[in-house]
């Protein structure tokens, strides 16, 4: 039996961050992973999807180029070349990560706990003083009647399609559904979304989700919202989804169905009960130090069930490793780290509180929005979709949250992350130089509006009764 100070189950982003942190503390660390090595983000998530999204973006820009006086046309889509480029890019990322993983002992194969400090891999038992479970998430089996028999594509398969279908039905309206669904549309696939909620991106504020829904429709994508899925079936070699909307039964037919209704924690086969670790459908049960119900076992990443974001997984992995071995226990705080982006067009970026969070918690706030179609740089370059929304404390103007739907929102949101980190106010935003003409200067306008509201409020309060 081999023994280690820290056994990391899962060599993805969370596990790799934790392993490096523990090794930096002088601990003997080993990985357990069934392979392929590299992690979801590199192999089947962030990086391959963004590589393909760029091709879709270029195709869209060419179609829209005439509006800016450039006459261009698409001679064709070289799908095999696009796929080969994606594999080449991802291969480089994966090779670099695997090289880092191989610096540790790696036990490859399915693993299962046999006791509270022992795990079995390929007939070999490994003992650990401490463990981290970072096995990520998986796409669940669909519960829509008839879908398994009819056949469907997951995001994994969309990223590896050898050729596109003529048309596709997208079930879902979350990050992955929206990004890859819009990509398919831009690559010439007639795309229809069937969304259960009132708008796409149902986890975001209504104004953001509703805006993206209308932009998709304006681009020619069919979006059915407020639906109840009934069943799927095959008809004359085509795939049909039946659903109810506004009291009527409707159906959509296509070559393919893209099933994108979320992911679930990857705990199958781990036999967590033998390790004294509890979990539910949302993830492994853990406290604010990422310690599970077994005090020597920690968890991080998607399997922890908090946020399915790579930067959160890395953050959690590092915190879990430090809490496993250092006396000072760090409490995870997601207020800032939960900032995120959606790489649709227009993009979405969110940092700090969303408006729906403040309403749910009963926190008072001031709000101001400003549209990109009134911003000089956005108008001049033809990127006028969307707006920025700023939320601030009504007492001192401290910024509570920022939501952006618009061009380059995934990059623009970083200014807001910095502002939140330093507990800046709207007055600070107005003092910070913003170059002209840039997209970034849009931040000054909602800040100015909130500052004016604060001044008016103070003036009204100062008036004699």
Image (spheres, rainbow, N blue to C red):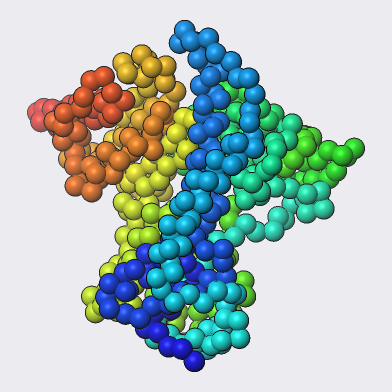
Q: How many marks?
A: 0
Q: Position of residue 85 (x, y in %)?
A: 54, 40
Q: Position of residue 68 (x, y in %)?
A: 45, 10
Left/right placement of residue 415 relative to residue 208 reads: left
Residue at x 53%, y 71% (from the top left corner): 33
Left/right placement of residue 365 relative to residue 425 reads: right
Quadrant position of residue 297: bottom left
Left/right placement of residue 458 relative to residue 296 reads: left
- The outermost residue toward the bottom is 1
329 is higher (above) or lower (below) than 409: below
Q: Position of residue 45 (x, y in %)?
A: 53, 50
Quadrant position of residue 332: bottom left
Residue at x 32%, y 74% (from the top left corner): 22
Q: Quadrant of the C terminus?
A: top left
Residue at x 40%, y 46% (from the top left corner): 340
Left/right placement of residue 430 relative to residue 290 reads: left
Q: Position of residue 409 (x, y in %)?
A: 38, 34
- The outermost residue toward the top is 69
Foreground: 380 or 331? 380
Residue 353 appearing in the image: no
- The outermost residue toward the right is 236
Residue at x 42%, y 42% (from the top left corner): 341
120 is higher (above) or lower (below) than 235: below
Quadrant position of residue 223: top right
Residue 160 appearing in the image: yes
């Amino acid at each position: 039996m081999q023994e280690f100070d820290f056994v990391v189950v899962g060599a993805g982003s969370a596990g790799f961050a934790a392993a490096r942190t523990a090794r930096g503390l002088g601990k003997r660390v080993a990985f357990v992973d069934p392979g392929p090595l590299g992690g979801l983000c590199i192999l089947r998530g962030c990086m391959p999807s963004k590589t393909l999204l760029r091709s879709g973006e270029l195709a869209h820009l060419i179609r829209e180029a005439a509006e800016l006086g450039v006459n261009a046309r698409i001679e064709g889509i070289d799908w095999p070349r696009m796929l080969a480029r994606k594999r080449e890019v991802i291969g480089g990322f994966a090779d670099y990560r695997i090289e880092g993983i191989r610096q540790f002992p790696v036990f490859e194969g399915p693993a299962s706990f046999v006791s509270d400090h022992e795990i079995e891999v390929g007939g070999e038992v490994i003992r650990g003083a401490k463990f981290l479970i970072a096995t990520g998430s998986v796409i669940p089996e669909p519960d829509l009647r008839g879908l398994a028999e009819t056949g469907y594509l997951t995001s994994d398969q969309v990223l590896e399609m050898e050729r596109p279908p003529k048309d596709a039905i997208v079930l879902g309206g979350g990050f992955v559904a929206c990004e890859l669904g819009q990509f398919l549309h831009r690559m010439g696939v007639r795309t229809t979304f069937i969304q259960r909620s009132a708008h796409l991106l149902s986890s975001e504020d209504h104004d953001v989700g509703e805006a993206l829904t209308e932009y998709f429709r304006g681009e020619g994508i069919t979006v059915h919202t407020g639906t109840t899925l009934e069943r799927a079936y095959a008809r004359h070699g085509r795939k049909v989804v039946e659903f109810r909307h506004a009291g009527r039964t409707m159906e959509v037919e296509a070559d393919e169905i893209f099933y994108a209704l979320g992911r679930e924690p990857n705990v199958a086969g781990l036999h967590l009960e033998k390790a004294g670790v509890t979990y539910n459908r949302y993830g492994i049960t853990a406290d604010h130090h990422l310690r599970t119900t077994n005090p020597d076992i920690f968890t991080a990443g998607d399997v922890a069930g908090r946020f399915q974001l790579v930067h959160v997984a890395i953050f959690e992995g590092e915190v879990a490793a430090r809490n496993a071995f250092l006396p000072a226990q760090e409490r995870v705080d997601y207020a800032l780290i939960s900032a995120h982006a959606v790489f649709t067009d227009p993009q979405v970026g969110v940092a700090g509180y969303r408006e729906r969070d403040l309403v749910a918690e009963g926190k008072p706030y001031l709000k101001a929005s400003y549209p990109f179609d009134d911003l000089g740089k956005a108008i001049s370059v033809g990127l006028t979709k969307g707006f920025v929304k700023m939320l601030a404390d009504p007492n001192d103007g401290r910024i509570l949250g920022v939501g952006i739907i618009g061009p380059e929102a995934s990059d623009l949101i970083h200014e807001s992350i910095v502002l939140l980190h330093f507990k800046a106010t709207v007055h600070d935003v107005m003092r910070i130089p913003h170059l002209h003409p840039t997209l970034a200067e849009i931040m000054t306008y909602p800040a100015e509006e909130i500052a004016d509201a604060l001044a008016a409020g103070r003036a009204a309060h100062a008036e004699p009764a």
